[in-house]
Amino acid sequence: QVQLVESGGGLVQPGGSLRLSCAASGSIFRINAMGWYRQVPGRERELVARVSNGGSTNYADFVKGRFTISRDNAKNTVYLQMDSLKPEDTAVYYCYLVRGYPYNDDYWGQGTQVTVSS
C-alpha cells in the first residue's frame, strides 16, 4: 500500500502563487510516475501535470508556462508550483502515483482545495 499526503492548498488572489506538496510513504517501489489532477464539481477529473521516474514532465495546455512540477526522489515528494493563478484554476487538486510491474496500480491523495478569488 501507498499513502499520499497533500498540503499547500488555500485561498489566493488572481495572479498569486501557491505551492502544493505531496509526500508518498509505504510501499513506494517501482514508481513510474507521480503527478497532479484537478476536479471541479460537475466535471471530470483532468490531468494538470505529471513527472516520470526518469524526470520527464508533461503539462496540460491550460497550465503551460504557469505551473511547474518537480520531484524530490530522496523525500518521495512531488511539488506543484502554481504561478499566475486564475479564477478558473479553482478546483480540488489530487496527487497521484503510478507503480509499474509487478504492481501495476495507482494511488490517489485525499485532495486539497485551491481557490483563486479576489
Image: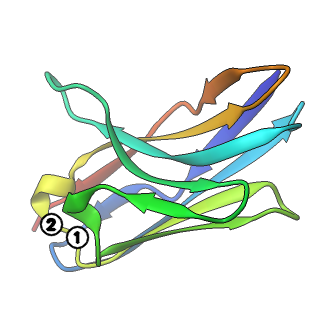
Left or right position of 2 against 4: right
Mark 1 residue type? Leu
- Residue 31 disc label: none
The correct choice, above or below, for 68 with respect to 20 in the image is below
Q: Quadrant of the N terminus?
A: top right
Q: Nearer the viewer, residue 46 or 40?
A: 46
Judging by the rendered image, the residue that carries numbered circle 1 is 85
Left or right position of 19 against 115: right
The correct choice, above or below, for 105 with respect to 28 in the image is above
Q: Secondary structure at mark 2?
A: loop
Residue 111 is situated, as x and y percent measured from the top left of the image, at 47, 36
Residue 66 is situated, as x and y percent measured from the top left of the image, at 29, 75
Could you classify mark 1 by the number of other residues whose Cα lies within 10 Å: few (under 14), some (14-19), or many (20 or more)? many
Mark 2 residue type? Lys
The correct choice, above or below, for 45 with respect to 114 in the image is above
Q: Nearer the viewer, residue 27 or 110?
A: 27
Q: Quadrant of the C terminus?
A: bottom left
Q: Nearer the viewer, residue 77 or 99?
A: 99
Judging by the rendered image, the residue that carries numbered circle 2 is 86
Residue 13 is situated, as x and y percent measured from the top left of the image, at 19, 72
Residue in the image at 57% along x and 53% along y = 7
Q: Secondary structure at mark 1?
A: loop
Left or right position of 100 against 115: right
Q: Nearer the viewer, residue 98 or 74?
A: 98
Q: Quarter of the image holding residue 89?
A: bottom left
Residue in the image at 64% along x and 37% along y = 97
Contact, mark 2 vs mark 1 (Cβ under 8 Å):
yes
Residue 34 is situated, as x and y percent measured from the top left of the image, at 62, 47
